[in-house]
Image: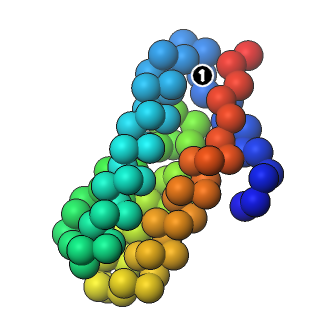
Amino acid sequence: MGNEKIIVRPDPDLADEATWYLGQLGEYAKNIKEAVFRGDFETVREIGHRVKGSAESFGFDGASDIGRALEQAAKDKDAAAAKAAADRFSDYLRSVELVFE
């Protein structure tokens, strides 16, 4: 993803919630990286599932896709795929810019 910005335009009525949720995604990313390092696939699966199911509600469609990949990697107990998805998640979050219109 490099330095390319990912513009996310949440519903203006959800501005506070979307800003909070972006911070929550950052916590999830940190927890996922730690879980991947420990080989804790259950935590990776749980967080991946949570992100998959909730991110689109706030306009973070890319995060939802990554959550799906994390959940599947954890179900498959595929450490390489889990690490790759965790890295994509961190890259995604570094690139996101919230725009409220």
Task: Inspect the image, locate mark 1, and give the three-letter code of the amino acid beneath it.
Answer: Asp
The 10 Å Cα crowd at callout 1, few under 14, some 14 to 19, many 20 or more, is some
Query: Which corner quadrant of the image does residue 9 belong to?
Result: top right
Q: Nearer the viewer, residue 89 or 54?
A: 89
Q: Nearer the viewer, residue 34 or 68?
A: 34
Q: Secondary structure at mark 1?
A: loop
Query: Which corner quadrant of the image does residue 34 belong to?
Result: bottom left
- The answer to whether 63 appears left or right of 95 in the picture is left
Q: Is residue 94 above or below residue 44?
A: above
- What residue is disc 1 on? 11
- The answer to whether 82 appears left or right of 56 in the picture is left
Q: Position of residue 36 (x, y in %)?
A: 32, 72
Q: For residue 98, say whether it is visible.
A: yes
Q: Position of residue 85 (x, y in %)?
A: 49, 70
What residue appears at the point 61 percent right and 57 percent down from the top-left corner?
91
> How many numbered badges does the structure rendering display?
1
What residue appears at the point 49 percent right and 53 percent down from the top-left corner?
64
Q: For residue 68, say whether it is visible.
A: no
Q: Nearer the viewer, residue 6 or 57?
A: 6
Q: Position of residue 6 (x, y in %)?
A: 72, 45
Q: Is residue 15 above or below residue 26?
A: above
